[in-house]
Image (tube, rainbow, N blue to C red):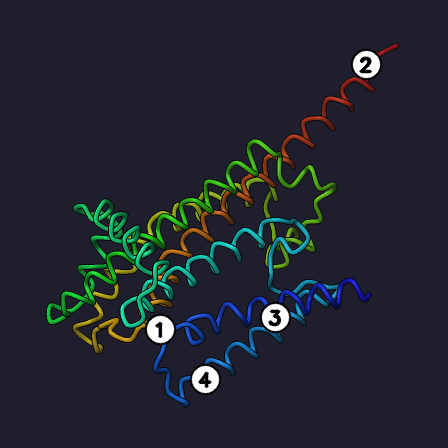
Amino acid sequence: MFARMSGAAIRGLLVAITIMVPALMLPGLGSDSTQVVILVALLAAILTFVEYNSVFPSIVEFRDAAPFNRLRFIALFITVFLLSAILKGKTEPTQLTDTLSAIGTIIGNAMDFPYSPVRLIVLMLPETSSYVVVESVRSSAGLAYVTSLIAMAAFLVLVRVLNWPARSGAFNVWVNLPLFDPTAGGDVLERLQRDARVNIALGFLLPFLIPAVVKLAADLLDPITLQNPQTLIWTVTAWAFLPASIIMRGIAMGKIADMIEEKRRRTYAENADGMQPA
């Protein structure tokens, strides 16, 4: 009981710190913005604590299938920290921020080719955007996208090479997939395989679709300028992290489907051997 509560408290604290990183690192944040950030961080920490302290799952998937959520959190924290450091260097440069800015510029320019996700998010900006904003978005998008690719590659290695999640013991579908109802109808294996393919395809398309949708909506709504550093950080982070998280979910569900299929194959083989005459 104490171990579960302490682990949930630590997770909630880490989530709150991640949300407050841009506000803590960037200068010139107004009092109203500070109050909003603190409120959001507090709510996220409470929700995380309640989820992980509860015996029964609610919405967080793969709760007991470490290190799936840990890997996603690390990718999110690194992305937020790197983008915050780059934008902090615009006003308060240090050796670290200059190095990160240089790396981000190199990656952003390398990935800014026709029809690439980085090119599309740059084209999403209004034509009146300043050169500084465009360069900040390009370098931030390149760095965030590479971070998400590294996270996906690490998870793929975890699944294919280290045999996640089988190495951690039995996989409880009810606890780790609370939003998946095995009794909803149809074969569970086929539904898992379908969901895995849909998640991977959607995650692949989102970095291309999000800038296009925002650009089309700019005619009806106020265009996103990304001149505010915090807006830039969270917009680019969501643009890079959400598709990567969806793809990782698809890979995970595909692995669960493979485990179920393998278990069925072994069961059928054992039953066939048992039915053979002595």
Q: Tell me the distance, in whole angstroms, between the alpha carbons under discs 4 and 1.
A: 12 Å
Q: Which type of secondary structure does the marked residue at label 1 adopt?
A: helix
* Quadrant hosting residue 189: top right
Dot 2 crowding, Cα within 10 Å, few <14, some 14–19, many 20+: few
Residue with the mark numbered 1: 230
Q: Amino acid under label 4? A: Val
Q: Secondary structure at mark 2?
A: loop
Q: Which residue is mark 3?
A: 13
Helix, strand or loop at mark 4: helix
**Three-letter amino acid code at the position of disc 1:** Gln
**Residue depth check, mark 1 versus mark 2: number of the one nearer the observer:** 1
Residue 6's quadrant in the figure? bottom right
Is 45 located above or below residue 148 in the figure? Answer: below
The image position of residue 79, as x and y in percent, is: 42, 58
Residue under label 2, please give it. Answer: 276
* Residue at position x 33%, y 50% in the image: 205
* Of pointers 4 and 3, the one earlier in the residue sequence: 3
Residue with the most extreme bottom position: 31
